Amino acid sequence: MNALQLGIVKSGSSLVISWPTNTPGYVLESATNLNPPVSWATVVSPTPVVVGGQYVVTNTIGVGTKFYRLHGP
């Protein structure tokens, strides 16, 4: 199995995050730091939309640091 990768692109004042739709059971999660223990939270807003075979989430870039990962089965 190939490694699943997030696509992340800055677009103006937004961050566009995408991943393939053929990944059932995976959810996008975020954390504000990576110091153990890391507290990952499911990104529930905005909800992903499907664009060209990809799930896409567009977030406004805010203050501070945020890390993203896909978590799944």
Image (tube, helix red, strand yellow):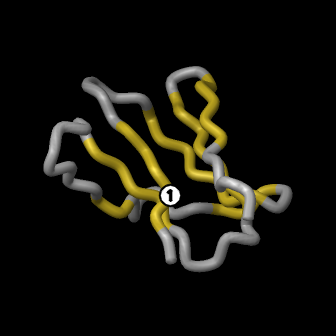
68 horizontally vs 56: left or right: left
Of the pair 51 and 5, the residue shown nearer to us = 5
Mark 1 element type? strand
Of the pair 10 and 4, the residue shown nearer to us = 4
Expressed as whole percent of the image width and height from the top left, the position of residue 2 reads: 74, 57
Expressed as whole percent of the image width and height from the top left, the position of residue 55 reads: 67, 60
Task: Look at mark 1 in the image and give the residue it sits on.
Answer: 70
**Residue at far front of view:** 1
Report the residue at 53% width, 31% height from top: 14
17 horizontally vs 36: left or right: right
Q: Report crowding for label 1: few under 14, some 14 to 19, many 20 or more residues within 10 A (C-alpha).
A: some
Report the residue at 14% width, 50% height from top: 37
Of the pair 17 and 68, the residue shown nearer to us = 68
In the image, is residue 56 above or below residue 65? below
Expressed as whole percent of the image width and height from the top left, the position of residue 8 reads: 60, 36
In the image, is residue 12 above or below residue 23? above
10 horizontally vs 73: left or right: right
Quarter of image, res 49? bottom right
